[in-house]
Amino acid sequence: MNISQLQQDILKLKKEKDVCILAHSYQAREICEIADFTGDSYKLSVDATKVGSKTILLCGVRFMAETCKILSPDKTVILSAPSAGCDMADQMDKATVAKIKESCPDYTVVAYVNTTADLKTICDVCVTSSSAVKIVKNIENKNILFIPDCNLGSHVAAMCPEKNIKLLNGGCPIHAGVTADEARAAKALYPDAELLVHPECVPAVCEQADYIGSTSGIIDYAQKSDKKEFIIGTEISIAEHLQYMCPDKKFHVLSLKLICPHMKATTLMDVYNCLNGNGGEEIILDDNTINAARRCIDEMIRLGG
């Protein structure tokens, strides 16, 4: 079976079974093409709340499927590749952060959306990479404990000098693995290109960027820019997607290290098997976890609105 035929079979099956397919922007092109919605993790969860389908098939990683379930507890949420986790989300657990909270009782705990549902239950507010600066500025408390990504946290701290931001040693090992030397080399190799990077990259890389932003921010910037050449400092799939979106522009990958193995775990065949009832994993969260984790997401909506 070729890719085109498989895609047609998937489109037919999802219509017959009334399944909404969500695909994170880091998914392969052939998966994004059959999705009802594509985008970053939080956008996908919000998209899921607006559809009539009672079954959601998430092509991404586990914390994204959990967030989707938190926002749509009445829907069946299926993670297409059960092995797809997130190294950053798994770095910190509730017990560890609860202990740190005891030593910082006057701090507001800000959790990046790239965290488990269990950890979100003891956090005060959730943020995305695109909303983090705005939300932290809108928090009344000056003292902020930002978890888990110290690189995104450093970016927020630089943009919010009026806040006292405490960081922990966590983050995305894929983005954090890119070095300042690699950024300099890429800029030298492509002198006419603008460097667009995700704030999960280390500060020494971000300092060289022409634009720092979320995945959706990078895509939007590149599409709207009058520039014709870009170096993309996030997961390599974004450079590929942008090539399709903007065929008149050139896109280069900042580093070949920027490959997320968890995002690559999902295949088009996985999606097909899920729709046939032969794959995937239903995300089950108890009511207490859903209600407690929902509070920090609701606070994100309030402060980021």
Image: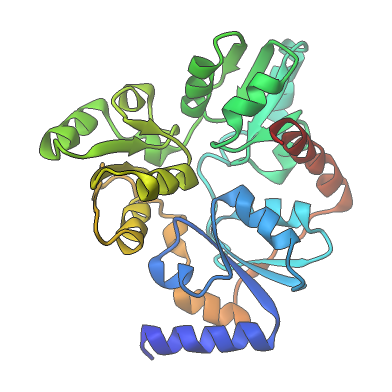
In the rendering, at what x and y percent does residue 31 appear?
Answer: 46, 70
Q: Residue at x 36, y 60 (%)?
A: 241
Q: Out of 167 and 19, give the one closest to the viewer.
A: 19
Q: Residue at x 39, y 85 (%)?
A: 4
Viewport quadrant of the C terminus:
top right
Number of numbered labels in the structure image: 0
Q: Out of 43 and 88, give the one closest to the viewer.
A: 43
Tell me if I can see residue 24 in this picture. Answer: yes
Q: Out of 48 and 230, give the one closest to the viewer.
A: 230
Quarter of image, res 45: bottom right
Please, is residue 22 above or below residue 174 in the view?
Answer: below
Q: How is the image coloured?
A: rainbow
In the rendering, at what x and y percent does residue 213 appear?
Answer: 45, 36
In the rendering, at what x and y percent does residue 220 appear?
Answer: 44, 47
Quarter of image, res 302: top right
Please, is residue 287 above or below residue 176 in the view?
Answer: below
Q: Residue at x 84, y 53 (%)?
A: 286
Viewport quadrant of the N terminus:
bottom left
In the rendering, at what x and y percent does residue 96 appear?
Answer: 67, 27
| Left or right of residue 84: residue 197 | left
Tell me if I can see residue 278 in this picture. Answer: no
Please, is residue 46 above or below residue 158 in the view?
Answer: below
Query: Outermost residue toward the left?
Result: 189
Q: Residue at x 58, y 89 (%)?
A: 12
